[in-house]
Image (cartoon, grey):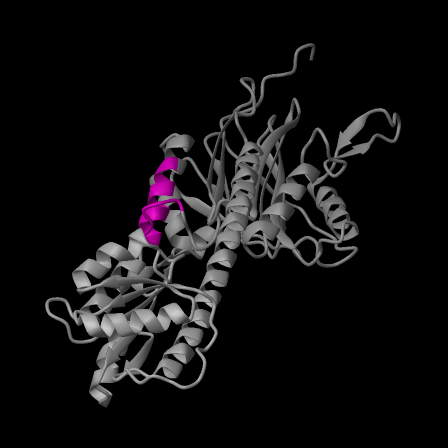
Amino acid sequence: MTLSALPPAAAPPLPILIVDDQPLQRTLLRRALGRMGHQVFEATSGEQALELIDHHQVQLIVSDWVMDGMDGVELCRRLRLRSRDDEARYVYFILMSSRDTREDLITGIQAGADDFLRKPIDVDELAVRLRSGQRVLDLQAGLARRNHLLGQAYERIQHDIDAAGVFQLSLLPTDGAGDDAPVDLSWLFLPSNQVSGDALNHFRLDHDHLGFYVLDVAGHGVASAMVAMIVTQYLNPRLSGCLYRQAQIDPRQLVINDPADAMRALNDQLLRQGIGSNYLTCLYGVLDLRNGRVRLVRAGHTLPLIGHADGSVEVIDDEGDFPLGLIEDTTFHVIERTLAPGARLCLYSDGITECENPARDGEQFGLERLRAFLAAQAHAPVAQATARFADVMREWAGQTTRSFADDVSMLLIEYSGPVPPAPGE
């Protein structure tokens, strides 16, 4: 070791481990590091060093390259392997050697060494290397603290998102349309994340009419989910002014809005609330339970399907209207069909038809496969059909969980015949 005439370079104190099988070399290093104010520990081998590192919470190691048994390079390699399990703690590693070839440097760096000291050791150079190591350790400690804070923030955000997902699920239908309703209803809801930009529902508007919708807010994640949850409240028959209007003769009486009027009211509401950038597509309809007549509005949404009792599937290929929340004073037109007893109306999001199969180079599920599935399930109970379709979707997407690239939703409504008259009629 080369002694310096200069005073020792000042550096913050560190717990440093010297690893060398030569007693004289350890003594010289211990004295030099002690003069700098560091806490010094010694190991005579790589094996002993691994035992001392955790016990003394060593932050920096100065190790000889060539030693009996485990050499310095192997010690560094094993230390880095162990560090993978403790990202919050980093040990700075300096290799000492008389070697200085390009191949030797590459070998040391590949093993995980941070710095090198050429023998004989110069004290001033050692002090400079230690200051460099201290800066790296300070940066690493700051990064670990920030990662810890980010981890805590992520846990809080994740908790809130999970809670929002639970709340969103609570907004989905929980029962049928009532024992007196001549309909069988089932739905499928598979979010791409904990929360979804899709929403669906069905509800009795009065004794003779069933309202229903499927909607899809543009985008993914929390922002889309929040808009979806807001819109579900606008379409809640107990809360909304979109689905009813006051009767002209008696304002205390409410009259069911035509689907076109309901969607115009919802569009105006969205624009007034200033969430027009999060536009949405929607299929909203009213089923007359007395005769099976369906009146629908398709605001930019996917094409609805009707599965007939004979197994044929009709696509309601109507031009449709603009999505909601984009343009003021948008007008909507009504699509009208009549469901025969045993016919099924299928509404769905584009997360179904655009679902990609990774094993087929991203081929989309498409409308024809959906039609074929509905035809094959024409005589299965609707609840059984939607359950089977969930399996079909997971298999097509190659998913073992509920995770999809886009939200997947479907509402299946089977009409069985005229509704019994209301009591007193």
- Residue 307 screen position, x and y as percent: 44, 40
Tell which residue pokes out farthest to the top in this image.
424
Q: Residue at x 46, y 58 (%)?
A: 144
Q: Residue at x 42, y 35 (%)?
A: 309
Locate residue 120: give its quadrant.
bottom left
> Magenta stretch: residue 391 in it?
yes
Q: Nearer the viewer, residue 113 or 339?
A: 113
Tell which residue pokes out farthest to the left in this image.
69
Locate residue 209: give its quadrant.
top right
Q: Quarter of the image for the C terminus: give it.
A: top right
Principal secondary structure, stretch drawn in magenta: helix
Residue 360 appears left or right of 248: left
Which residue range is magenta in the image?
387-402
- Residue 153 screen position, x and y as percent: 54, 49
> Magenta stretch: residue 100 in it?
no
- Residue 102 screen position, x and y as percent: 24, 89
Q: Is residue 418 above or below residue 224?
A: above
- Residue 46 screen position, x and y as percent: 19, 64
Residue 72 appears left or right of 364: left
Q: Quarter of the image for the N terminus: give it.
A: bottom left
Residue 126 appears left or right of 206: left
